[in-house]
Image (tube, rainbow, N blue to C red):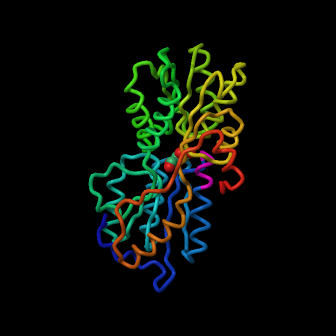
Amino acid sequence: CGGEDAGSGGSGSGGGKITLGFSQVGAESGWRTANTKSIQESAATAGIDLKFSDAQGKQENQIKALRSFIAQRVDVIAFSPVVESGWDTVLKEAKDADIPVILTDRAVDSQDTSLYKSFIGSDFVLEGKKAGEWLVKEYEGKTDTVNIVELQGTPGAAPANDRKAGFADVIKADPKFKVIASQTGQFTRTDGKEVMEAFLKTYPDIDVLYAHNDDMGLGAIEAIEAAGKKPGTDIKIITVDAVKDGMTALAGGKINYIVECSPLLGPQLMDLAKKVKAGEQVPQRVLTEETTFTQEQAKAALPDRKY
Ligand code: GZL
């Protein structure tokens, strides 16, 4: 769906070599590590000069990085917004500086879509729906209450907001599904384990855990086992991402279903950056390809997993 005519971009290093300023969320999960690797390797392959900044999960660090890229007159700016809100001012500064911006991975809630040339990432609402649809099928024909606990991603982050909404939208069809607790585990193993420990102390009969990423699910598995319960059997577990550690737990029966969210955005980002720099029209929205995995499918897919 045609985007805007891309800006001419900054002076950058002039000539052929494109300078791309990239602000990354942080290093909170296996997914993020794989995403960073994809971006760094793809920039090298594409002959793009990458200025990479790790925000350690803080929006103020991302805004600082974007302002630094503007000051350096990079040709293109790309970033994965740690949260959805609070970007309009700095995005307007980039637009006023005639430096095109590409969003990767996560969206912003800016109403003015002229503030960025393209957004490449997953449909997180759909990911939440896929998780819910598996659960509905898993409990088809059953009438007992299904007690669900939810480990949410980073507060305010698009994947956390949307995976929660998509899941809730599907399970609301059947009142037997009850989300008895829902709390952030910050997309990390450590927090996922701590919050699951608290859930287990408070709720003796948890049937299902829905974790917004593998890492929190893996942390929760440690807590479930420490509590003397069998993950994947006593408590069914659904996660999102499909990184290698998650797929290994799925193949091993400790997770029941994983909705894939691909971190391999690097090649498409570099292609978009080149097009935007050349002033070519680019799609406003680029959806990433992804699937879902059962335990059997994970066993088959594991040997070829790239991350
Ligand atoms: C999703 C990405 C999320 C992953 C988490 O595109 O933003 O952030 O699902 C990561 O693992 O921390």
The furthest residue to the front: 141
Asked if residue 25 is positioned above or below residue 76 in the image, the reply reads above
Return the residue found at the far bottom. Answer: 15
Identify the magenta region.
28-34
Q: Position of residue 149 (x, y in %)?
A: 52, 24
Residue at 67%, 27% (x, y): give it.
Answer: 231
On the picture, is 251 further left or further right than 123? right
Image coordinates for residue 235, horizontal then vertical, percent: 62, 24
Q: Quadrant of the N terminus?
A: bottom left
- Nearer the observer, 131 or 154: 131
Residue closest to the far left: 112
Classified by dominant secondary structure, the portion drawn in magenta counts as helix
Q: Nearer the viewer, residue 211 or 71?
A: 211
149 left or right, relative to 256 = left
Does any portion of residue 129 appear in the rendered image? yes
Q: Using the image, determine if residue 297 lies above or below residue 64.
A: above
Q: Residue at x 49, y 14 (%)?
A: 144
Query: As rendered, which of 269 and 15 lies closer to the eye?
Result: 269
Q: Where is 228 relative to 192, above or below?
A: above
Question: In this view of the protein, can residue 57 be seen by the observer?
Answer: no
Give how far across and how far down residue 284 sits, in percent: 34, 62
Choose top left, top right, bottom left or bottom right for residue 295.
top right
Q: Does 28 appear above or below 51?
A: above
Question: Looking at the image, which residue is at 56% across and 15% down?
Answer: 203
Quarter of the image with the C terminus is bottom right
On screen, residue 192 versus residue 248, left or right, reads left
Is residue 123 magenta-colored? Answer: no
Q: Is residue 32 magenta?
A: yes
